[in-house]
């Protein structure tokens, strides 16, 4: 019994240190915080981010419409940090070309990104994996 318990604890501890090398896949915005205020996901449309090995594209999806790309950029991961640089924005953005540092965690199928924007606003976004 003790040996089995030791093996289980060892596996759990070691699995908590698995390094994720990318966020590869499609993630849908599920809500977040900005400046201390909670925002739920929009009901009339959805926002999705498609991550490849080191790039991302963000799309606005409305029923009956073609997906609209509103943002893209580069990203890299370390153990607990995600570094993003927006390289394209559909609308003028103060984030374009700026490296943003987020701390990130993934719990089950949800990605949590938390950071401070260059204008000082603290943000936290929640993204659910869809693919």
Image: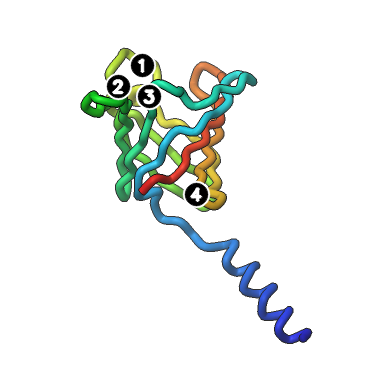
* Up-down relation of residue 78 to residue 44 (above or below): below
Q: Nearer the viewer, mark 4 or mark 3?
A: 3
Give the residue pinned by disc 3: 45
**Mark pair 4, 2: CA separation:** 27 Å
Q: Residue furthest top?
A: 92
Cα separation, mark 1 vs mark 2, equals 7 Å
Name the residue rendered at 60%, 62% in the picture.
16
Whole-Å distance between the Cαs marked 4 and 3?
Answer: 20 Å
| Colouring scheme, one of rainbow, by chain, secondary structure, one colour | rainbow
Q: Which residue is mark 2?
A: 89
* Circle 1 residues within 10 Å: few <14, some 14–19, many ≥20: few
What is the crowding at mark 2: few (fewer than 14 residues within 10 Å), some, or many (at least 20)? some
Mark sitting earlier along the chain (4/3): 3
Is the residue under label 2 in contact with that under label 4 (CB below 8 Å)? no
Disc 1 and disc 2 in contact, CB within 8 angstroms = yes
Closer to the eye: label 1 or 4: 4
- Residue highlighted by disc 1: 93
């Amino acid at each position: 019994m003790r040996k089995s318990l030791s093996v289980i604890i060892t596996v759990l501890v070691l699995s908590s240190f698995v390094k994720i090398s990318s966020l590869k896949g499609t993630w849908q915005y599920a809500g977040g915080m900005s400046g201390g205020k909670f925002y739920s996901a929009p009901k009339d449309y959805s926002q999705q981010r498609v991550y490849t090995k080191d790039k991302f594209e963000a799309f606005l999806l409305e029923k009956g419409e073609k997906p609209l790309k509103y943002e893209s950029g580069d990203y890299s991961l370390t153990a607990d940090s995600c570094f993003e640089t927006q390289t394209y924005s559909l609308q003028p953005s103060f984030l374009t070309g700026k490296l943003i540092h987020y701390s990130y965690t993934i719990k089950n199928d949800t990605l949590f990104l938390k950071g401070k924007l260059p204008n000082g606003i603290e943000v936290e976004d929640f993204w659910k994996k869809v693919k």
